[in-house]
Amino acid sequence: MGFDRAFDAAFSVLAFVVNRHLIHHMLRATRTLGVDYETLIVWGVLAHQNVAHLMPPGQFGSDAVTNRGYVSGEGRELRPVRIRDLSQITGIPRETVRRKLETLAKRGFVCRYESAGWIVDRRSMEPDLREFTRESVRQLLTCANQVHALLDETIVALPEQAPRAASRGSSRPNGGKRRARGNGTPRSK
């Protein structure tokens, strides 16, 4: 049985499990950082864009980090991001992005990098954000295991699909004809 069939059969429960994880994560993040959701989005997009050039899609970028998990080495610097780019990516107005970055800078989470843009401040990562991320990964793995178990249970519980009749083009047992009502007239569509 395919993923799509199992997903469709377990949709409500899967949506609940995933939504619970996402909401819990967002609440934890805003409380830990002491910022609102828009500021959290700006910070997260900035952090992602600072290192995206080192981790192209499909690659983990593990060769770009030290044994402590930080980006290092020649040509492996954080790439500064301009306010206009953050605004375009997030859909948040430029002036609001600027204010959010100033708030993050006052809290020590980001800094202006010369005139090239903004970067995350690595000093803010230890130890609280490292522990926050450790717990976030644990919770993400728990959620992923729950989703996997739900899909597996659904696959086992669903009956096998019977092959479709190729000659008729209809899955109705009477060849595609609608049954007559009790008075002998066919039902209208």
Image (tube, rainbow, N blue to C red):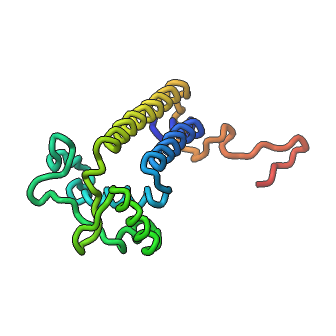
- Residue at screen point 28% across, 44% down: 126
| Residue situated in front as seen by the camera: 132 or 81 | 132
Q: Quadrant of residue 180?
A: top right
Taking 170 as reference, is 57 above or below it? Answer: below
Residue 34, percent from left and from top? 46, 51
- Residue at screen point 61% across, 41% down: 171
Taking 159 as reference, is 136 above or below it? Answer: below
Relative to 137, is 119 on the left or the right?
left
Where, quadrant-wise, is the C terminus in this rendering?
Answer: bottom right
Relative to 13, is 138 on the left or the right?
left
Residue 168, percent from left and from top? 58, 45
Q: Is residue 101 visible?
A: yes
Taking 187 as reference, is 117 above or below it? Answer: below
- Residue at screen point 87% across, 44% down: 184
Residue 169, percent from left and from top? 57, 47
| Residue situated in front as seen by the camera: 143 or 48 | 48
| Residue situated in front as seen by the camera: 169 or 24 | 24
Residue 57, percent from left and from top? 27, 54
- Residue at screen point 46% across, 68% down: 91
Q: Is residue 165 visible?
A: no
Residue found at the very far right of the displayed protein: 183
| Residue situated in front as seen by the camera: 170 or 138 | 138
Residue found at the very far front of the displayed protein: 106
Taking 70 as reference, is 53 above or below it? Answer: below
**Total numbered circles:** 0
